[in-house]
Amino acid sequence: MSLEGARNRSGGNAGLMLLGLGLYTVMMAYLLRIPCRVPDWNMAQQVPELCATVIGTGDLSVRSSDVAGGFFTGGPTGDQPVLVGMITTIIGWFASNLTSLLGLDVGQGFYLDLSLILLALVWLAIVGVVSSLSGNRRSDALVMALAPVIVLVGFQSWDLWAVLFMMLALLGYVRGNPALAGIMVGFGASVAFFPVVVLLAILIMAARHRFLKDILSAFIWAVVAWALINGTYMITAWDRWRAQFGDMVRSDTEQPSLWNVWSSTVEPRTGVSLGTGADGQYVLLSMILALVFVLLIALLSKREPSAVQITFLLLALYILLAKEYSLTYVVWLVPLVILCRRNWIEFGLWQVVEVLYWATVVLPASAWPTLPWVEEFGWSAQDILAVVRYVFLIYLVVAVVVDMFRGRKAAALGASAVQ
């Protein structure tokens, strides 16, 4: 057998393994939520976080006359990001008309299955993109495909779509196509705000090389793609679009955030107050300093950093300083962490911490009594894990910064990943 044939066979086997592990993750997510569909068990009331879904009853009945309106203006319920609205309108129309088309009795369960299948395909695409960015270490994508956080929360929102567009933007830039990267950012920003950090990463790379053509191309195409998706909605329903856009980009600290965790666990024992994130006392200044910090790290590192490393730093610092650190945002960090660090043990420990924190959120408070050795401090298991997960994220940020200074790991990414 020739060397080229052996490589093709090895690549085919690796692809099949990636597909199998990705499907395994999807199946586990599906099996985990089967109890939520048993009416007599009342799981939705007992563990609402487990059974939470973004699918609304208004998404299930889309008449043919509603397709054009919902497709451009926030979906059947009119309260979704426009790109998500396009997707749910098509799925809702298909689900509501399948009975008449095929003579089948289609209900909410089928619609949920159809939505899960669509998200499953998106997850498989993300695994494929990570594999492409991994260079010679395709096994990193295998590890990421089994990430338990994806099983627990990845399929409860539409964020996976935006994660896919973010990773496609990075892949486009890595392969020397900033225009494609910009288009993917425009699509991703029509679902969630985070893909915009790829533009900042391209800007920082352009500053390092003193070459602005890439960022200009990426920015222009991002604006064009975003305008094509959002233009009709903005024109026909400006107030609704503006409200949804504000919700998407607004930092909300009602969920666990650095400011809330500090005020509930550290401040009572040290007396040191950081204020609250809602007051914005430190958020804006800290974000500006974080951006300057990442820029200096990228400029001062001896070897060229990877756009993936810069994107991770920008996103992680944003979550740390301004946005709540919800479990959904872990989904955004998973592909970036596996690409930046390439340390399976470290990745596994991080996932264990997040899974334990998820358990404290989902299970009743009575299931997590105060631990004896911290009883004098009055901390609960959730308080401890909330602190640990922030410490772990800070560790990952520091580790990536050190890698960039030492030139480690960056050589396996960037342009070298496709050679």
Image (tube, rainbow, N blue to C red):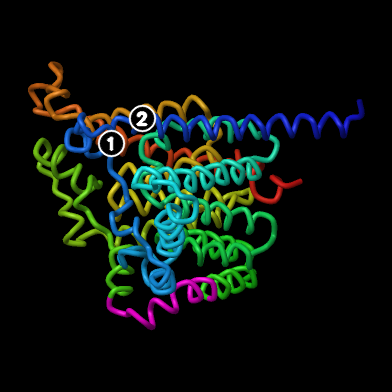
Is the C-beta separation of discs 1 and 2 under 8 Å? yes
Q: SS class of the residue under badge 2?
A: helix
Tell me which segment is drawn in magenta.
224-239
| Vertical position of residue 234 compared to residue 207: above or below | below
| Vertical position of residue 276 compared to residue 337: above or below | below
Q: Is residue 235 magenta?
A: yes
- Specify the quadrant of the image occupied by residue 236: bottom left
Q: Residue at x 59, y 62 (%)?
A: 181
Q: Amino acid at mark 2?
A: Leu
Q: Amino acid at mark 1?
A: Leu
Q: Inspect this view and state whether residue 289 appears.
A: yes
Residue at the top extreme, as displayed: 372
The residue nearer to you, when weighing 107 against 253, is 107
| Vertical position of residue 379 compared to residue 94: above or below | above
Q: Is residue 328 magenta?
A: no
Q: Is residue 295 left or right of residue 249?
A: right
Residue at the bottom extreme, as displayed: 235
Q: Residue at x 15, y 19 (%)?
A: 371
Residue beneath disc 1: 50
Q: Residue at x 22, y 48 (%)?
A: 255
Residue 172 spot, x, y in % from top left: 64, 58
- Specify the quadrant of the image occupied by residue 78: bottom left
Residue beneath disc 2: 32
The residue nearer to you, when weighing 74 against 223, is 74
Residue 408 spot, x, y in % from top left: 60, 39
Q: CA distance from mark 1 to mark 2?
A: 9 Å
Q: Which mark is residue 340?
A: none
Q: Residues within 10 Å of mark 2 (few under 14, many from 20)?
A: some
| Magenta segment main secondary structure | helix
Residue 17 spot, x, y in % from top left: 63, 29
Q: Is residue 158 left or right of residue 218?
A: left
